[in-house]
Structure formats: structure tokens, C-alpha cells
Amino acid sequence: MTETGGPSGPEGTEMPKPKAGEPAQSKAGEPAQPQADTPTPPQGEVPPSPAPEQQWQSPSGATPPPPPLPSYQPPPQQQYPNWKVGLGRPGVIPLRPLNLTDILDGAVTAMRKYWRMVFGAAAVTAVLTAAINLVGLLLVDTTADLERMRDLGPAATDQELMNQMLGVLGGTLASSSISLVATLLGTTVLTGFLTVLMGKAVLGKPVTFKEALREATPRLLPLLGLTVLYTIAIMVAAIFCLLPAIIPYTFWALASPAFILERGTVMEAFRRSVKLVSGMFWRVFGILLLATVISSFLASIITIPFSFSAFLSIFGDLDQLYVPSTGDLILQSVGTVIAQTIVGPFTALVTVILYIDQRMRREGMDIELARAAGIATPPPPQAW
């Protein structure tokens, strides 16, 4: 026994007294007693975890929410047009292979957007053409021959009727030749001007009347020769048979816009037209024929009120031959001017758009036009 009354240790040894602040050691084989200042939780309960040291709390006691994580922002990428919808539409037509609706809509859109230039040029050429036609009709007067044929009566012999008919036919051919020359001149000027205008309109670039006329003027005289050759080829083919006439009409239909826009020679323009039309003959022919039918139909509606006297003669005495007066000729010329001013540009614009469409289909001209218009084109596809 020790002096303190506690059990003694092994013989010759005494248990060391614990120092101040140190827990008393337990006997061997006995669990250590918990510290006096640490309360023992009831059996089956988990002691609470100690509070973290120096944790900031708001005055109200609520823990502030964590800061939001920054959202991922992909790097900016250059936007390219979708190949399915083309390379955009900087001007009057989309830069992709066109269908019939696109071609007709492009012609109408150009007439609406550049109406001052389109209808102004058409009015000038229509007035000049009508003036030349009227002068030709007055110089080659067939009125006297028509009146003599009307006055022959049923007692006229076959020889007299033949002579009068030959006289009327000769005068009609002479006046028709003058009218054809006037039409070729007007068509050449209008086609050259509208081709230059459409070349700018496809890109959406501004253009003035003087700029378009200055660019087209040096090409007008060779373009007139091209137009004459084109017309003669159609007329010669039509004399022998109607079907072969559509061959030069279609294969050489794109020669005028090719001559103006590509700035080659006349023969090169004819060859370019044949190359662009080959393989799509019936498509080109159908679109040109439809444009011609639409123009002719609208022109006939406009000119009917100005040819009222000739229209009434149909319902009059069939035995009486209609002889137009000078007033009738002037009134008909006015109607022709109005019709050509409104309808004339349509066929020319359709022809130019058809030329551009064929080049986009065969030569990838849409990519060149997109670059000229400042549109970013997609990179070429890479092979695996």
C-alpha cells in the first residue's frame, strides 16, 4: 500500500503521480478514463462535430451562397453561308443555281429596284424605235394601194387584183424592213445597257445611268452586228422549216450577255453561248419561250386600246378593207411605246439572268460573285 492509500505496483516500484494538466494513466488492461472536462455523450448518440475554426458568418447568421461558376463561352467562329441555301443574296438573285421562279422574280425585282434606269432606258429606245417605224410607214405609203384595192369591186379582173396585191406586198415589205432595222437598233441599245445594269444588280452594287451607258457604249456597235447575225440565222432557219429555227434561237440566245460581260469577240460570244446551253437545251428554250409569251401577252393587252379602230374593223363589214389613217398610225405608235417601255426590259433581263444561272451551274460563278460582293465563302472540303 502506498501512502496515499492506493494500490501499490509491482514490488519495489511505485506508480508515478500524474503531473498537473496530464490525464491519469489507467492500469494495465483497463480502458483509459475520459477527461473530467469532456462530457461523455449518452449511449447510442453521436457527438456533434466541432465547429470549424474562424468561419465567417453574416450578422443574421446565414451562410453566403457560393459565387457562380463562369459559363463556358466558345471561341467566336466565322459564319459561313449554308450550301443548301446558297451563298447569300447580295443583289436581285440568290447566289446559287436558280429555278424558274428565281429567274422570273430576279427580272421583276431588278425592274422594281432600278425602275428609273430600267424604264428610262426602255422609254428612250421605245420612242426612237416608234419614231423610225412611223417615219417608215409615212414614207412607204401603202394607203393608196389599199384604197385602190378596195375600190376595184367585184368587177375587177384577176390581173388587176394581182397587180394591186403585189403593190401592197412590196410596200408592206419595205415598211417591215424599216421596222426591223429600228427594232434591231432599239433592242441592241437596250440589251447592252440592261446587261451592264444586271451585272451590277447581281452584286448589289450601286450604279448610275451614266456609268452603265459609258460601260456599254464601246460594245454597242459590235453588239449590233451580233444581233443582226442572230436575227438572220433565225429568219433563214424559219424560211425552210419552223423547227430548225429554234436551234439557233436557243443555242445563240446567250451570246449578247456573254459578249458584254466577258468582253470577247463576236465569234467567241457565239461559242460561249453554245457551250453554256449544251446539255440544257430544252430548259433554256422553255424559259426563253415562257418569257416571250408573257411579254407578248402583256404587250397585246396594253396596245389594244390604242388600236381600237383596227379592232372595230373586225366586227364591221368584211367586204370593206380597213385602211388606217395617219391618226390611227400615231395612236398605235403611242401604244407601242407604252408597251415596250413596260414590257420590253423583261425579256432582256431574263436572258441575262439565265446566262448567269448557266455559269453558276457549270463554272461555279456563284463563288466568284460572292467574293466580289464581299461574302465569306466556305473553305473547300478536305479529304480524309
Image: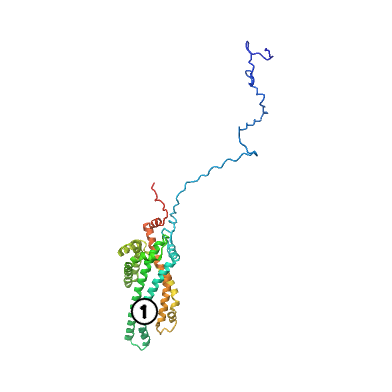
* Coordinates of residue 133 in the picture (x, y in percent): 37, 76
Give the left or right position of residue 4, taking residue 214 as reference. Answer: right
The image quadrant that residue 308 belongs to is: bottom left
Screen quadrant of the N terminus: top right
* Coordinates of residue 88 in the picture (x, y in percent): 44, 57
Q: Nearer the viewer, residue 16 or 322?
A: 16
The single residue placed furthest to the bottom in the displayed view is: 155
Q: Nearer the viewer, residue 258 or 128?
A: 128
* Coordinates of residue 189 in the picture (x, y in percent): 36, 69
Compared with 359, 150 (above or below) is below
Residue 197 visible in rendering: yes
Residue at position x 37%, y 59% in the image? 359
**Colour treatment of the image:** rainbow
* Coordinates of residue 16 in the picture (x, y in percent): 63, 15
Residue 287 visible in rendering: no
The image quadrant that residue 370 belongs to is: bottom left
Q: Nearer the viewer, residue 352 or 286?
A: 352
Q: Secondary structure at mark 1?
A: helix
Compared with 115, 160 (above or below) is below
Compared with 83, 2 (above or below) is above
The image quadrant that residue 252 belongs to is: bottom left
Residue at position x 32%, y 80% in the image? 170
Q: Which residue is disc 1 drawn over?
A: 137
